[in-house]
């Protein structure tokens, strides 16, 4: 037996490791299992290039929990270590670097994740163990098996031992204050999180499976009996879809990989992008487009970041542009510096390139789908709208590309690109100032009357829904000169698309002056202004409108942007169609029935705008009923 001192410059590094890494003790298992996987892969490599001539055998990695003894063992059958190698790789650790490391990153968010990159991976075992043993037999023929042991002080012992199987056991004697790790479920949970896609099979105990009876036993119904068997509990899928060449994968492989990633998500994704770059940086992965619901927040942050199949994090905000965090899936890159600090990551050249690359790939994929099968693309458009609008609003490069495939849908269900649409409406919907006016509704049911009137005049109405609509409209107005969007109920149609020709009024000036106060007397003047107009007589006698800009401001406030709240009180216009026969009739009545008449007309307008509710609705119903019984 030999004793020695681990080559550390700091008096005792372990208390520092422990304290420093306090927030995330569980990563010790990721470090040890990935070391075991590394050792197994190295052996595979040596075998393939002829340096290792023995049998590879079964290279599985095993994680063994002994609750009684309070030990956790990580066992591999990889390259193993000779005494010299232990000395070199374990004892002579670059703790000069470690001290620097601690000083540099102390207190920084995510710093625990770079531990592996400083050769401290193995020592993270001391976060949870009072004592650690390495029992190892090297791949080299005739090697002597050795055991290294340390209790977390810089002293260690090195002993020759009997070990006949090649590879390494790392044995942790779990510390009293870390007994949470002496628990099967806890260990299983950590393995599921970090080791799910490691490239070498990782086994943790056994699990029960039900199979057809091997003896062919039958039950009462003469069916083959199902019997329980204990099988090795393999934690991981060593060949996840993103590591396989796209040509070797079918659509259902992508679908089943999605379910593997998100076992609790029922909705299937729309489609995916398989990323595969090796120059000028390394990046593989599969991104899925989910069906994005109104509530985008629950969809967000589902992309998992891996480095060589080791799980790193599921918060990728700094690596991909914000709008892409709506996607799901996996990114794997050894070139992304592990989450050092947010500002550092954002300025990292590789991260920028990767982010630009992903944005481009996503835009190209959408463009390709649009070109290849427009009908199919249109069918998916409903679920893509928020994503594409979000992308266009937040990323100029994406916006530039998206112009070619971003669609609008009209109330008849036809889809157009903006370019196509502007051409379609050019003749009828250009006003006297040469502006193209795009009419839209965000609720065809509620705004039915308005939509119908516009369509009766031959105008087209778009159906624009979703939380980003008002922002997106603004963006479209900036991108397309002399184009304005107006919701159908923003004003009377003649005002919305002002052609410069007036419809003659049937009312005299006196009659018009007489009319206005009749309505003003029966409505809330803080909320409504009255306006008399001459519209076609077959259109509604009264419409209630809300100026486009006021509504947009209010909508954007509701979305959480802008600080104008209060500056924009809820305001509506009551637009009276002086040419409607009902108005002519009303003018001829005496005062009392005139009042009643005005109220009735206003309520009808409110009703068609969906604004008549509660007590007001009841008053309207009572009034109508008593009218019916009287006459
Ligand atoms: P890193 O993995 O970043 O090199 P670690 O502290 O995790 O740093 O491991 C240090 C070194 O110890 C490894 O590079 C490897 O040479 C050796 N080592 C650790 N675990 C094993 C193992 N299970 N089998 C063989 N060698 C190992
Ligand atoms: Mg390591």
Image: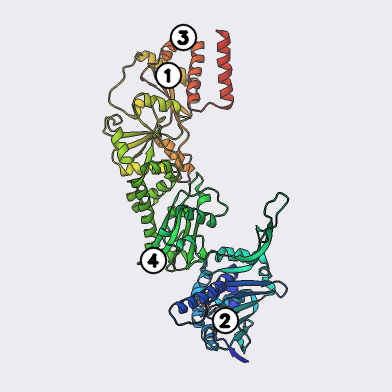
Q: Quadrant of the N terminus?
A: bottom right
Mark closest to the chain's N terminus, 2 or 4:
2
Depth check, mark 3 against mark 2: the one in front is 2
Q: Position of residue 317 (x, y in %)?
A: 46, 58
* Nearer-the-camera pick, 482 or 528: 482
- Binning the other alpha carbons within 10 Å of mark 3 as few (below 14), some (14 to 19) or many (20 upward) gives few
Q: Secondary structure at mark 1?
A: loop
Question: Callout 4: 10 Å neighbours few (<14), some, many (20+)?
Answer: some
Judged by depth in the image, the label closer to the viewer, 4 or 3, is 4
SS class, disc 2: loop
Asked if residue 331 lies left or right of residue 417, the reply is right
For the residue labelled by badge 3, is the local secondary structure a helix, a strand or a loop? loop
Report crowding for label 1: few under 14, some 14 to 19, many 20 or more residues within 10 A (C-alpha).
Answer: many
Q: Please tell me in which quadrant of the rendered image residue 86 appears.
A: bottom right
Find residue 541 and name its label.
Answer: 1
Q: Which of 536 and 575 lies nearest the eye of the viewer?
A: 536
Q: Nearer the viewer, mark 2 or mark 1?
A: 2
Q: Which residue is mark 3?
A: 589
Q: Within the image, what quadrant is residue 127 found in?
A: bottom right
Structural distance between the alpha carbons of marks 1 and 4: 64 Å
Residue at mark 3 to residue at mark 2: CA–CA distance: 106 Å
Q: Position of residue 63 (x, y in %)?
A: 62, 71
The numbered mark, 4 or 3, whose residue comes first in the sequence reads 4
| Residue displayed at 51% across by 46% down | 295
Q: Do tag 3 and tag 2 residues touch (Cβ < 8 Å)?
A: no
Please report whichever mark, 3 or 2, sits nearer to the chain's N-terminal start: 2
Name the residue nearer the viewer: 496 or 572. Answer: 496
Residue at the disc numbered 2: 166
Dot in front, 1 or 4: 4
């Amino acid at each position: 037996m030999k004793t020695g001192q681990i080559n550390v410059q700091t008096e005792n590094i372990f208390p520092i490791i422990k304290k420093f890494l306090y927030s995330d003790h569980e990563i010790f298992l990721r470090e040890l299992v990935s070391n075991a996987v590394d050792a197994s892969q190295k052996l595979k490599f040596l075998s393939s290039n002829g340096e290792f001539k023995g049998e590879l055998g079964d290279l599985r990695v095993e994680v063994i929990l002994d609750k009684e003894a309070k030990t956790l063992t990580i066992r591999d059958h990889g390259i193993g270590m000779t005494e010299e190698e232990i000395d070199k790789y374990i004892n002579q650790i670059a703790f000069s670097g470690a001290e620097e490391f601690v000083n540099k990153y102390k207190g920084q968010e995510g710093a625990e994740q770079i531990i592996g990159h400083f050769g401290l991976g193995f020592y993270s075992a001391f976060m949870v163990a009072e004592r650690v043993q390495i029992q190892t037999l090297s791949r080299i023929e005739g090697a002597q098996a050795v055991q290294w042991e340390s209790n977390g002080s810089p002293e260690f012992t090195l002993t020759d031992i009997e070990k006949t199987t090649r590879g390494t056991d790392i044995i942790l004697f779990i510390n009293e204050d870390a007994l949470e790790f002496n628990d099967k479920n806890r260990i299983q949970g950590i393995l599921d999180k970090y080791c799910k896609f490691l490239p070498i099979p990782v086994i943790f105990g056994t699990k029960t499976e039900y199979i057809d009876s091997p003896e062919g036993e039958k039950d009462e119904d003469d069916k083959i009996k199902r019997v329980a068997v204990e099988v090795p509990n393999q934690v991981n899928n060593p060949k996840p879809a993103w590591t396989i060449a796209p040509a070797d994968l079918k659509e259902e492989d992508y679908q089943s990989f999605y379910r593997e990633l998100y076992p609790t998500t029922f909705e299937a994704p729309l489609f995916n992008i398989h990323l595969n770059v090796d120059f000028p940086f390394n990046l593989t992965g599969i991104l899925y487009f989910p069906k994005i619901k109104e509530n985008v927040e629950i969809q967000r942050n589902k992309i998992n970041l891996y480095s060589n199949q080791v799980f790193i994090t599921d918060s990728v905000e700094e690596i991909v542009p914000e709008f892409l965090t709506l996607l799901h899936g996996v990114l794997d890159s050894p070139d992304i510096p592990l989450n050092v600090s947010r500002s550092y990551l954002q300025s990292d050249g590789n991260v920028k390139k990767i982010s630009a690359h992903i944005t481009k790939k996503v835009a190209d994929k959408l463009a390709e789908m649009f070109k290849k099968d427009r009908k199919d693309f249109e069918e998916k458009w409903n679920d893509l709208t928020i994503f594409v609008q979000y992308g266009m609003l937040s990323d100029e490069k994406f916006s530039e590309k998206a112009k070619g495939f971003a669609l609008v849908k009209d109330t008849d269900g036809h889809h157009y690109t903006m370019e196509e649409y502007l051409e379609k409406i050019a003749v009828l919907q250009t006003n006297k100032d040469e502006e193209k006016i795009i009419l839209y509704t965000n609720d065809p049911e509620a705004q039915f009357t308005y939509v119908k009137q516009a369509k009766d005049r031959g105008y087209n109405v778009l159906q624009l829904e979703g939380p980003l609509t008002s922002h997106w409209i603004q963006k479209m107005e900036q991108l397309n000169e002399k184009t304005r969007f107006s919701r159908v109920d923003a004003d009377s149609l003649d005002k919305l698309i002002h052609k410069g020709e007036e419809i003659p009024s049937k009312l005299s000036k006196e009659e018009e002056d007489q009319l206005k106060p009749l309505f003003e007397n029966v409505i809330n003047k803080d909320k409504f202004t009255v306006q008399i107009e001459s519209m076609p007589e077959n259109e509604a006698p009264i419409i209630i409108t809300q100026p486009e800009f006021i509504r947009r401001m209010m909508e954007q406030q509701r979305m959480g942007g802008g600080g104008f709240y209060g500056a924009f009180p809820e305001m509506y216009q009551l637009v009276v169609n002086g040419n409607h026969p009902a108005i002519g009739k009303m003018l001829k009545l005496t005062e009392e029935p005139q009042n009643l008449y005005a109220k009735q007309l206003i309520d009808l307008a409110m009703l068609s705008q969906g604004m008549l509710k509660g007590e007001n609705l009841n008053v309207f119903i009572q009034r109508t009923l008593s009218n019916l019984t009287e006459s």
